[in-house]
């Protein structure tokens, strides 16, 4: 699946997107965040506060308990403000 990173998540990870194949036990967005955070220090820094990270699966906003099975693209971004 393709992962896309935006704003300071992208800055901390050091890339805008990548293709990954998480292990079978990674079933939800929350699991994916945990798996990514364990990859290295850059990911750990980007996902150090998982409750503030927002996610979208195939362009639809989802919560951390959303299943990732069948997802083509998952995007991660910080909270947004409008104005």
Image (tube, rainbow, N blue to C red):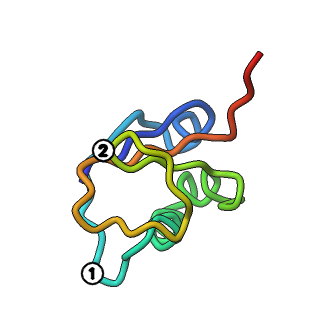
Point 50% across, 46% down: residue:
61
Position of the C terminus by quadrant? top right
* Residue ID for mark 1: 24
- Left or right: 65 in relation to 8: left
Spatial CA distance of label 2 from label 1 is 18 Å
* Residue ID for mark 2: 18
Point 54% across, 64% down: residue:
37
Q: Where is residue 50, by image quadrant? A: bottom right
Position of the N terminus by quadrant? bottom left
Q: Where in the figure is residue 59, as x and y percent of width and height?
A: 38, 39
Between discs 2 and 1, the one toward the N terminus: 2
Point 71% across, 52% down: residue:
52
Front in this rendered view, residue 79 or 34: 79
Crowdedness of circle 2 by 10 Å Cα count: few (<14), some, many (20+)? few
Residue placed farthest to the bottom in the image? 25
- Above or below — where is 61 with respect to 68? above
Q: Nearer the viewer, mark 2 or mark 1?
A: 1
Q: Secondary structure at mark 1?
A: loop
- Left or right: 40 in relation to 23: right
Q: Where in the figure is residue 26, as x and y percent of width and height?
A: 37, 76
Residue 7 image label? none
């Amino acid at each position: 699946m393709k992962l896309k990173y935006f704003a300071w998540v992208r800055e901390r990870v050091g890339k805008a997107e990548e293709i990954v194949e998480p292990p079978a036990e990674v079933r939800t967005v929350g699991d994916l965040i945990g798996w990514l955070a364990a990859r290295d220090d850059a990911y750990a820094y980007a996902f150090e506060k998982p409750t503030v990270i927002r996610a979208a699966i195939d362009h639809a906003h989802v919560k951390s308990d959303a299943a990732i099975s069948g997802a083509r693209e998952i995007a991660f971004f910080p909270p947004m403000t409008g104005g």
